[in-house]
Image (tube, rainbow, N blue to C red):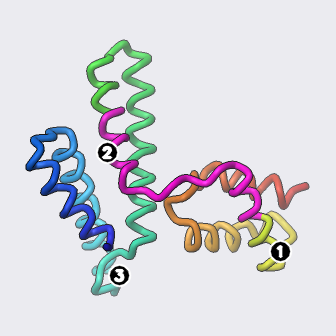
Amino acid sequence: MTKREEFTTSLKDAMKSKDEIGVATIRLITAAMKDKDIDARGKGNPNGIDEAAILSMLQGMIKQRQESFDIFTKAGRKDLADKEEAEIAVIKRFLPAQMSDDEVKKAIDGLVTELGVSSVKDMGKVMGALKSKYAGQMDMAAASAAIKARLAG
C-alpha cells in the first residue's frame, strides 16, 4: 500500500470512528502533499512527489509541531500544546520505525565507505544518499551533525 492509499484509508477510518484530531491531521497531511505535488508538476514531474518526499514532508510536519509544542508549553498554553502533541502522534503513525543512534552511525559509516568520501566538502553526497535510502527513518538534522563529526575527525 502506498502512502497515498494509506492516508485515504486512515482518513476513512478516522471519520468512521469520529476521531476529530485524526481527521483534521490527515486532511492537513493530504493538503500539504497536494501542494508538494503541484510544485513537483511545475518542475516537470507529472506524477507529483515520490514516497521518499512524502516521508520527508511528514518529518517536517512533526518538526513544526514539536517547535509549536515547545513554544506553547513555555507560554503555559497546555490546551494548544496538547493539540500539537496529538497531531504529532497521528503523523508518526505514517512514518516507518525510527533508527537508533547506533543504526544511524552504522548507516553513515557504510555510506562514507561506499561513496569514498573523506572530507566535509563531500558531506552533501552522504546526505543525499541518506535521504534516498533512509527517508523518514531518521532525524536528518541529527544525521547531518553526525556526518560532519565523522568527516571532520
| Residue type, numbered disc 1 | Thr
- Magenta stretch? 85-108
Q: Is residue 92 magenta?
A: yes
Residue 65, above or below 149? above
Q: Which element type, helix, strand or loop, lies under badge 3?
A: loop
Res. 90 mark = 2
Residue drawn where x is 57% and y is 51% of the image: 139
Q: Position of residue 62 (x, y in %)?
A: 41, 45
Q: In the image, 117: left or right of 136?
A: right
Q: Position of residue 37 (x, y in %)?
A: 28, 72
Q: Which element type, helix, strand or loop, lies under badge 1?
A: helix
Question: In the rendered view of the protein, which quadrant contains the N terminus?
Answer: bottom left
Q: Earlier in the sequence, mark 1 or mark 3?
A: 3
Q: In the image, 98: left or right of 125?
A: left
| Residue type, numbered disc 2 | Val
Q: Position of residue 110 (x, y in %)?
A: 77, 70
Q: What's the magenta bit mostly, secondary-structure-wise?
A: helix
Residue for badge 1: 113
Res. 43 mark = 3
| Residue type, numbered disc 3 | Lys
